Amino acid sequence: MNYSLTYEVRLPSNYNTEQQYPVIFALHGMGSDEQDMLRLMEPLQSDFIIVAVRGPIGQGSGYAYFQIKSIGNPVRELFDASVQGLQQLIVDLSAKYAIDPARRYIAGFSQGAIMAMTLSLIMGDAIKGIVAMSGYIPQFVKDEYKIKPNSELSVFISHGDQDHLFPLQLGEDNASFFREQTNNVTYVPYHGGHQVTPDLYQQFQQWLRTDAKLTAEDPKGLNS
């Protein structure tokens, strides 16, 4: 399955190709689109390059990165194709824009969180950190994908205790799995459903700003 991904890039107002900027690749949930993620990431645009990527599959009035057989069970062919397409897009845009290779982040909600977690596990040093809100890691990713995360990978995982699609246990499992891969895991369970609450909205923004700043000051994690 070959396709090109639709995306939109927002640059900081002071964008200078002689500098290097942290980047956030923002991935939406099923039935949503890149515009929702642009709105969600808008407060970070002064500090980051924002790349919001549309899923390639039509889903209702929006889009998806893959279809599912059942909850927790993606259609493998579609899932693999989106993973490959997103990997290539990250590589291509990293060469096109003034992106700091030590500060590449992926932020996603629901399906976007699933993609973010998967990409961070297989792309090694290409990914510095992720924000994964209300997602899960497919079992075949854990069992069959070649996992080689950045040794300094920073992870922010959040999950609502009233999530009607993905139970809270999945958030707990995500955090536990990533703690086996890296020491830099922040897990935020919150009171709410399958949504980004106002508190969570503030928390993930602060986390991204802090991690990007610390990484700029200590890019190889020498003080960690």
Image (spheres, rainbow, N blue to C red):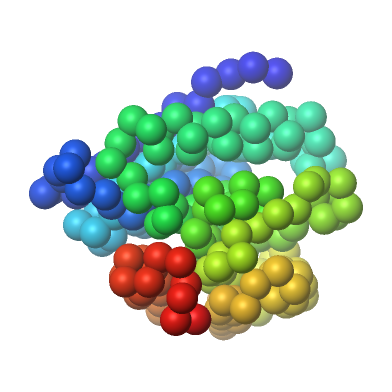
Q: Looking at the image, how many numbered discs can be counted on the residues? A: 0
Between 33 and 181, the residue placed more toward the observer is 181
In the image, taking residue 116 as reference, residue 140 lies left or right, namely right
Q: Position of residue 42 (x, y in %)?
A: 28, 55
Q: Position of residue 207 (x, y in %)?
A: 41, 74
Q: Position of residue 156 (x, y in %)?
A: 54, 71
| Residue furthest out toward the front | 222
Residue displayed at 55% across by 68% down: 152
Between 182 and 28, the residue placed more toward the observer is 182
Residue displayed at 80% across by 36% down: 75
Between 180 and 73, the residue placed more toward the observer is 180
Observer able to see residue 117 = no
| Residue furthest out toward the left | 14
Q: Is residue 154 above or below residue 58?
A: below
| Residue furthest out toward the right | 143
Residue displayed at 56% across by 41% down: 31
In the image, taking residue 188 as reference, residue 142 lies left or right, namely right
Where residue 149 sits, quadrant-wise, is bottom right
| Residue furthest out toward the top | 2
Q: Is residue 211 above or below residue 26?
A: below
In the image, taking residue 46 as reference, residue 80 lies left or right, namely right
Observer able to see residue 182 = yes
Q: Is residue 178 above or below residue 113?
A: below
Q: Position of residue 193 (x, y in %)?
A: 59, 70
Residue displayed at 47% across by 72% down: 221
In the image, taking residue 169 as reference, residue 21 lies left or right, namely left
Screen quadrant of the N terminus: top right
Where residue 68 sits, quadrant-wise, is top right
